Amino acid sequence: MVNYNWDCKTVDAYIKQNEESDVVYNVHWRVTGVSTELNSEGEPYTVTNIGTQTLSTDSTTGFIPFDEVTNEEVVAWTKSAMGEEEVASLEANIASQIDLLINPTSVTLTIGE
């Protein structure tokens, strides 16, 4: 099993737009998958993917002042902008990478002289 931690705390914002200040339009997201299975050192397997997601600012209904915005709200905005399919694909990719750490299918070897 893999648990996902979405960090969407870094954003780009328009200084001023439609009479509002600090309007978030781009999110720098970091998603970390943490397995419930532990490695030989007792640590969980982890994989992190990073990216950006543009948000629509065409209609800013229910505008929240930046100093009141939480990571959870920005995560919700980001997931909504991505769409369920892309979010599921991203999390499945992380789970697949973790599975390859747990059950590797290849190794790197060095040929001796």
Image (cartoon, rainbow, N blue to C red):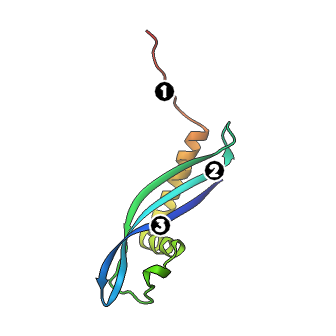
Q: Which residue is pictured at 36% across the width and 80% down the height? A: 23
Name the secondary structure under disc 3.
strand
- The mark nearer the N terminus, 3 or 2, is 3
User: How much space separates mark 3 and mark 2, taking CA atoms?
Assistant: 21 Å
Percent x, y of residue 36:
68, 51
The answer to which image quadrant residue 42 occupies is top right
Residue receiving disc 3: 8
User: How much space separates mark 2 and mark 1, taking CA atoms?
Assistant: 24 Å
The answer to which image quadrant residue 59 occupies is bottom left
Q: Which three-letter amino acid code belongs to the residue tagged 3?
A: Cys
Residue receiving disc 1: 108
Percent x, y of residue 73:
51, 76
Percent x, y of residue 28:
40, 63
Discs 2, 1 touching: Cβ within 8 Å = no
**Foreground mark, 3 or 2?**
3
108 above or below 64?
above
Res. 72 mark: none
Name the secondary structure under disc 2.
strand
Q: Which residue is pictured at 46% across the width and 12% down the height? A: 112
59 above or below 50?
below
User: How much space separates mark 1 and mark 3, taking CA atoms?
Assistant: 35 Å
89 above or below 64?
above
Q: Which three-letter amino acid code belongs to the residue tagged 1?
A: Thr
- The mark nearer the N terminus, 1 or 3, is 3
Q: Which residue is pictured at 54% across the width and 48% down the height? A: 96
Percent x, y of residue 34:
60, 52
Neighbor class of circle 2 (other Cα within 10 Å; few <14, some 14-19, many 20+) is: many
Q: Which three-letter amino acid code belongs to the residue tagged 2?
A: Ser
Neighbor class of circle 3 (other Cα within 10 Å; few <14, some 14-19, many 20+) is: many
Q: Nearer the viewer, residue 56 or 22?
A: 22
Residue receiving disc 2: 35
